[in-house]
């Protein structure tokens, strides 16, 4: 449960205390930039060049999940089905949620390769 909370809060995968991103994502056209290292435990987030390209697969899966949830809600609420309206609903939601989905994709990707270390979580900032 702590791992899920740290992912949703965009915290360092190693200590779960330091910020993972340069700034928090905002709706629409906000660029998501990962910090070079954790300000709390000094874990390097940029493991190698182009490391976060793999997070595109996670972002795709999150986008498909959003599409599935919105489609399900749409089919439950609306009596007549208009596919063009559903399409614009999904596109609009993905445009608004894009920075959040990209941020969560990057932190999930980083959690595959960086593991939690309780010693670093208890150490003080140096």
Image (cartoon, helix red, strand yellow):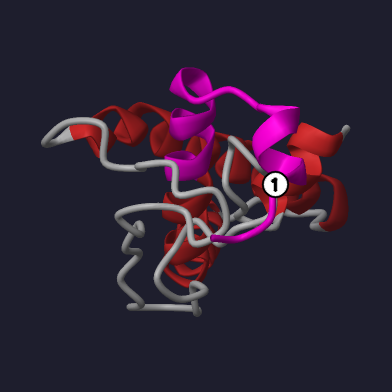
- Residue 83 lies left or right of residue 99; in this view the side is right
Q: Is residue 59 visible?
A: yes
Give the image location of residue 84, x and y in percent: 46, 58
Report the residue that reaches farthest toward the left.
49
Q: Quadrant of the C terminus?
A: bottom right
Q: Nearer the viewer, residue 36 or 104?
A: 36
**Is 51 situated above or below 112?**
below
Q: Is residue 120 shown in magenta?
A: yes
Q: Position of residue 46 (x, y in %)?
A: 26, 41
Regarding mark 1 in the picture, which secondary structure is present there? loop
- Occupied quadrant, residue 17: bottom right
Q: Position of residue 57 (x, y in %)?
A: 36, 27
Q: Is residue 29 left or right of residue 82?
A: left
**Quarter of the figure with residue 33:** bottom left
Q: Which residue appears at 65% of the width and 42% of the height?
A: 15
Mark yes or no: residue 69 visible.
no
| Residue found at the far front of this picture | 126
The residue range painted magenta reads 105-126
At x 41%, y 78%, the residue is: 28
Per the picture, the main secondary structure of the magenta-coloured stretch is helix
Depth check: 73 or 85 in front? 73
Magenta run includes residue 77? no
Q: Please tell me which residue is depicted at 49% across the width and 72% down the height of the picture.
A: 25
Residue on which the image places disc 1: 123
Q: Position of residue 99 (x, y in %)?
A: 43, 64
């Amino acid at each position: 449960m702590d791992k899920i909370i740290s992912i949703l809060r965009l915290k360092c995968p190693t200590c779960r205390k330091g910020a993972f991103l340069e700034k928090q994502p905002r709706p629409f056209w906000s660029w998501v930039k990962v910090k070079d290292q954790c300000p709390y435990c000094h874990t390097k987030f940029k493991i190698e060049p182009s490391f976060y390209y793999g997070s595109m697969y996670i972002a795709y899966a999150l986008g498909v999940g959003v599409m599935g949830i919105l489609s399900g809600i749409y089919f439950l609420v609306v009596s007549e089905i208009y596919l063009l309206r559903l399409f614009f609903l999904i596109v609009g939601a993905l445009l608004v949620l894009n920075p959040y989905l990209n941020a969560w994709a990057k932190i999930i990707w980083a959690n595959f390769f960086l593991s939690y270390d309780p010693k670093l979580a208890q150490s003080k900032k140096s």
